């Protein structure tokens, strides 16, 4: 395979930017900025995501079987970079960000423009990122969105000319 072509072609896939969160109620709270996310069914509403198999977030999700996907708005570029690093809870904040627990216990970021909470249906253990299939069991929209919801979300291409995850 031509590795340059593989990289360029796979980087044609457009992505939104999300903060994946989970809390196992044993003191392990995870938060990671992710982009490998899509909806995969209407009924039940399913989402699939690729989660780094050796990450803290993966370990928490695998044990607690629930997670939240926090949608980042166009102006939340700084937040995306905050959660590229391992998350810490201090003074009731998650890496400095205020949050509230969702129905699953997963942190919902106050700065997110929306969030879904999911129950893990299955995990497909293939590759360096495992595929987590989640059923959406709660949705949070703090403020109505004007215009197309997919215009409101921060996208990979908004993070700068050199930022990619894929290829
Ligand atoms: C641009 C970008 C996109 C990322 N997308 C994903 C992703 O889709 N899935 C994932 O598991 N990690 C992704 N990561 C890595 C996580 O953000 C990172 O491993 C995580 O925040 C580290 O925390 P943890 O290991 O403590 O969970 C991405 C990183 C960058 C820089």
Image (cartoon, grey):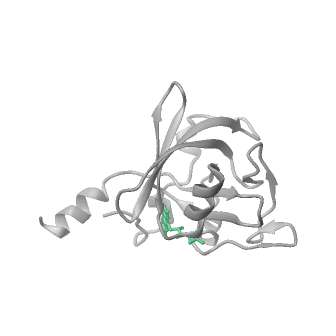
Residue furthest to the top in view is 43
Residue 76 position (above or below residue 86): above
**The one of 126 and 97 positioned closer to us in this rendering:** 126
Q: Which part of the image, by quadrant, shows the C terminus?
A: bottom left
Q: Is residue 133 left or right of residue 25?
A: left
Residue occupying image coordinates x 19% and y 69%: 4
Q: Which part of the image, by quadrant, shows the N terminus?
A: bottom left
Residue furthest to the left in view is 1
Whether residue 68 is visible to the viewer of this picture, yes or no, is: no
Residue occupying image coordinates x 72% and y 35%: 144
**The one of 7 and 57 positioned closer to us in this rendering:** 57
Residue furthest to the right in view is 91
Q: Quadrant of residue 36?
A: bottom left
Residue 111: horizontal and vertical position, in percent? 74, 55
Residue 160: horizontal and vertical position, in percent? 46, 68
Q: Is residue 23 left or right of residue 6?
A: right
Q: Is residue 16 left or right of residue 28?
A: left
Residue 113: horizontal and vertical position, in percent? 68, 47
Residue occupying image coordinates x 70% and y 52%: 112
**The one of 141 and 90 positioned closer to us in this rendering:** 90
Residue occupying image coordinates x 62% and y 42%: 118
Q: How many marks?
A: 0
Whether residue 96 is visible to the viewer of this picture, yes or no, is: yes
Q: Quadrant of residue 141?
A: top right
């Amino acid at each position: 395979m031509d590795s340059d072509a593989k990289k360029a072609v796979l980087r044609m896939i457009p992505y939104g930017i999300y903060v994946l969160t989970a809390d196992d109620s044993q003191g392990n709270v995870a938060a990671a900025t992710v982009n490998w996310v899509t909806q995969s069914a209407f009924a039940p509403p399913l989402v699939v995501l690729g989660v780094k198999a050796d990450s803290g977030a993966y370990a928490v999700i695998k044990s607690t079987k629930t997670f939240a996907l926090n949608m980042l708005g166009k102006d939340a570029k700084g937040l995306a970079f905050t959660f590229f690093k391992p998350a810490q809870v201090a003074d009731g904040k998650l890496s400095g960000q205020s949050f509230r627990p969702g129905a699953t216990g997963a942190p919902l970021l106050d700065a997110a423009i929306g969030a879904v909470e999911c129950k893990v249906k299955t995990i497909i253990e293939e590759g360096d990122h495992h595929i987590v299939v989640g059923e959406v069991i709660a949705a949070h929209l703090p403020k109505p969105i004007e215009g197309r919801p997919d215009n409101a979300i921060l996208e990979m291409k908004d993070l700068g000319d050199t930022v990619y995850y894929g290829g």
